[in-house]
Image: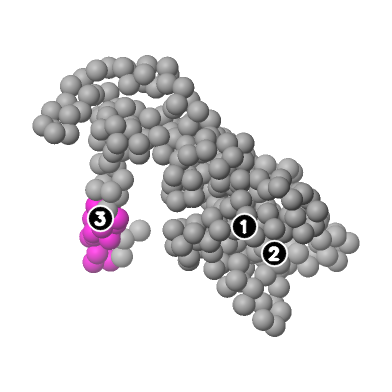
């Protein structure tokens, strides 16, 4: 309801800056990508030509794109452990204990380190004669001369990149869950404790339903982040050792192959996959999803 003396249209002035930024940096690029996906674009002249679904047919026949898309879908396996790990860390550092701020900062530290700097350290750790193989040797999980090449082996490299991504991002989601835990009402927790509910029952039937909006947000963000895996792949393996993801494919086709129409079509497919997964997640973790129905998992 508008305040007396204030014109109802005044509200539009307050939301106009957001829509201006959204239109320029989100809506316009999406519409331009949609337009580009159905055309042959020649950057030297700026001309373009309608080609129908030719790019999508080419992508359907491309084993390279199919493999890159499969790697992006494998990257989605990172989402559940990332969320469980972030929630577990948030529950650990939620307690009001002396010095707990140090551990909160320690777990969040990887988030603020630049990917390029962190990747240099991880390359030294995961190299053939690196720290991680030395540790495995010291506890006799591998023998001398059996050191895996974590970033060069086609069977291992993608999972090594996923481990790096977990380490880099778990602190970010921990902070979101930590903020969500501050909003969990105390009364239901105390009532459940008086009724004899153990820690797991309180978590499942009180804490998780209360965290439903945060869980939904974190799951959506981490799913989008997994499908957008690009920077960590480039800095750790440069897309070699069978680690090329869908966005690395888009980058290579656009800026090395100069086929912007094909790259736009591949980007559009990734966007549609992302929207489909978001719809599924809204179904299960939304306002009327499993968590809101008594925390049944």
- Disc 1 crowd rating (10 Å Cα; few below 14, some 14-19, many 20+) is some
Which residue is at a point 42% across and 21% down the rendered structure image? Answer: 62
Is disc 3 placed on a helix, strand or loop? helix
Q: Tell me which corner region of the image, top left, top right, bottom left or bottom right, holds residue 15.
A: bottom left
Where in the figure is residue 232, as x and y percent of width and height?
A: 48, 50
Quadrant into which the C terminus falls? top right
> Against 73, is 38 above or below?
above
- Disc 2 crowd rating (10 Å Cα; few below 14, some 14-19, many 20+) is some
Is disc 2 placed on a helix, strand or loop? helix
Cβ–Cβ under 8 Å for marks 3 and 2: no
For disc 2, the marked residue is: 91
Q: CA distance from mark 1 to mark 3?
A: 53 Å
Cβ–Cβ under 8 Å for marks 1 and 3: no
Q: Is residue 295 left or right of residue 150?
A: right
Which contiguous range is marked in magenta?
Answer: 4-20
The label nearer to you, 3 versus 2, is 2
């Amino acid at each position: 309801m508008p305040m007396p003396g204030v014109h109802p249209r005044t509200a539009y002035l307050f939301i106009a800056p957001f829509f201006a930024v959204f239109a320029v940096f989100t809506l316009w690029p999406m519409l331009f990508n949609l337009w580009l996906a159905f055309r042959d674009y020649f950057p030297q002249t700026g001309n373009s030509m309608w080609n129908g679904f030719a790019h999508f047919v080419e992508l359907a026949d491309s084993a390279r794109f199919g493999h890159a898309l499969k790697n992006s879908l494998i990257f989605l396996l990172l989402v559940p452990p990332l969320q469980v790990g972030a929630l577990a860390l948030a529950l650990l550092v939620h307690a009001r204990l002396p010095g707990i701020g140090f551990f909160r900062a320690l777990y969040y530290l990887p988030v603020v380190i630049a990917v390029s700097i962190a990747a240099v350290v991880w390359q030294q750790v995961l190299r053939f004669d690196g720290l991680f193989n030395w540790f495995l040797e010291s506890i006799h999980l591998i023998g001398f001369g059996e050191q895996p090449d974590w970033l060069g082996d086609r069977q291992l490299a993608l999972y090594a990149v996923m481990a790096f991504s977990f380490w880099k991002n778990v602190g970010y989601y921990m902070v979101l869950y930590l903020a969500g835990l501050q909003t969990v009402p105390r009364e239901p927790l105390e009532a459940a404790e008086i009724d004899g509910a153990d820690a797991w029952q309180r978590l499942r039937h009180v804490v998780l339903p209360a965290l439903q909006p945060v869980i939904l947000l974190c799951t959506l963000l981490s799913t989008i982040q997994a499908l957008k895996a690009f920077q960590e792949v480039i800095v750790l393996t440069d897309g070699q050792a069978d680690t090329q993801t869908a966005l690395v494919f888009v980058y290579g086709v656009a800026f090395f192959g100069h086929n912007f129409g094909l790259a736009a079509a591949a980007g559009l497919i990734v966007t549609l996959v992302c929207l489909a997964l978001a719809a599924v997640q809204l179904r299960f973790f939304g306002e009327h999803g499993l968590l809101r129905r008594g925390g049944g998992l």
